[in-house]
Amino acid sequence: MFKINDNYLRLQGSYLFSTVAKKTNAFMEKNPDRKVIRLGIGDVTQPLAPVIIDTLHKAVEEMGHAETFRGYAPDLGYEFLRKAIAENDYRSRGCEITADEIFVSDGAKSDSGNIQEIFSTDNTIAVCDPVYTVYLDTNVMAGRTGEFDTAAGCFKNVIYMPCLAENNFVPELPGQVPDMIYLCFPNNPTGAAITKERLQEWVDYANKNGSVIIYDAAYEAYITEEDVPHSIYECKGARTCAIELHSFSKNAGFTGLRLGYTVVPKDLMCGDVSLHSLWARRHGTKFNGAPYIVQRAGEAVYSEEGKKQLQEQVAYYQKNAKYIFEHLKSAGYEVYGGVNAPYIWLKAPNGMTSWEFFDFLLEKANVVGTPGSGFGKCGENYFRLTAFGSFENTVEAIKRIEAL
Ligand SMILES: *Cc1c(COP(=O)(O)O)cnc(C)c1O
């Protein structure tokens, strides 16, 4: 009789988005005359920029001719894309990352889930609380955590790093040293950013203690403040302790096209084994490349035209974020995030739980957000609103909340 991977049985049901959808649909059925506005989604809504569409059309055309047809892509991704990434995301920011340290993939979700495979299951992990659950769940699947402790609301053998208003949603360096540290800045769900100075402390801590940092930079394009790093490699010593994940989803609207990349510097070693060679082996064995046409579209993100059009697209969402942040703040809400991220993180008023506030907003303002408790214990009493809606809907939703 076969056996299953029973680590999967330890996973906690991810009821967050399904419960949000269920409650929203039930409300809409009961109140068909109300216009419900969704500010809960973590997906972009603006169409792909014109230069991306043109590039896709051209690449599709190439695939229809024997002379320009492309089959399997190179393991690490096409050089034209890796060179554009190395130049624009790294060299231009003074980071020493070369094209052959970049692994092109179908997105940051898969990479953030797969990267743990090259590490021992004996390693202890540290995650922020609240957290993008992929980091945690993929480690549960791999058997790197203990049982879920229902009373405590967390997995055993995981170092949870509380992110609260008191620490500006940037965790303290853990007293118990983790082997693997997951960090995501600017952060989903809190919208918090980390300064270069603070991130340098993490890099120093990791180098000193022999930990590896897995740094998710998916929201880098939303940074507006000078002292906030776009890459962990802006910090000294990061080449020997950090892996960085990037996505084309939030900066260029590729959530449906699928493209991302992971950087594993060649200086990142465990004894005499390079993590670069392990990840190259894993990537080459289990992944057959992002589509040629999508990698061409990725290259266009870094063209002069692409940069201009995408800056406008990101600015559109940033304007929403600013609107939500400022208006809720003047309405007396305790609000965070929004400045370097498309997420606004607010405290539910009058001691309401996250779900009580969800029900209250849905019933009274017909606005849907995401309960913070769904991202971890420390998210309780908080609530996430996203800037990914249309400006008109965002303004209307906030007006309704202001009028409560
Ligand atoms: C949206 C998001 C990503 C991007 O995932 P893709 O698979 O590239 O679409 C990665 N990390 C976080 C924290 C995110 O919110």
Image (cartoon, rainbow, N blue to C red):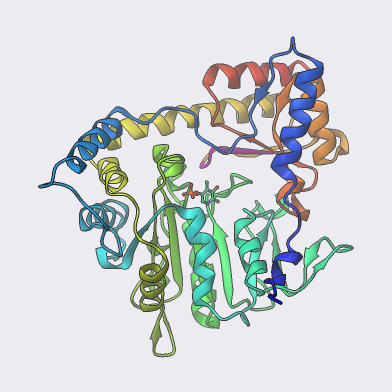
Please identify the residue farthest to the top as the structure is shown.
33
- Relative depth, front residue between 59 and 382: 59
Please identify the residue farthest to the front as the structure is shown.
1
Q: Which residues are magenta?
A: 340-345
Location of residue 83 (image quadrant): bottom left
Location of residue 3 (image quadrant): bottom right
- Relative depth, front residue between 79 and 162: 79
Q: Residue 284 placed where, x, y %? A: 35, 69
Please identify the residue farthest to the right as the structure is shown.
151
The image quadrant where one finds the C terminus is: top right
Q: Residue 317 placed where, x, y %? A: 49, 30
The image quadrant where one finds the N terminus is: bottom right
**Left or right of 241 in this view: 70:** left
Q: Which residue is pictured at 41% across the width and 53% down the height?
A: 106
Residue 268 vs 391, above or below: the answer is below
Q: Residue 302 placed where, x, y %? A: 26, 44
- In the image, is residue 335 part of the stretch drawn in magenta? no
- Count of labels shown? 0
Q: Which residue is pictured at 60% across the width and 57% down the height?
A: 134
Please identify the residue farthest to the left as the structure is shown.
67
Q: Which residue is pictured at 40% across the width and 86% down the height?
A: 273
- Relative depth, front residue between 321 and 22: 22
Instruction: Report if residue 172 is visible in the image.
Output: no
- Relative depth, front residue between 132 and 380: 132
Residue 269 vs 395, above or below: the answer is below
**Left or right of 163 in this view: 47:** left
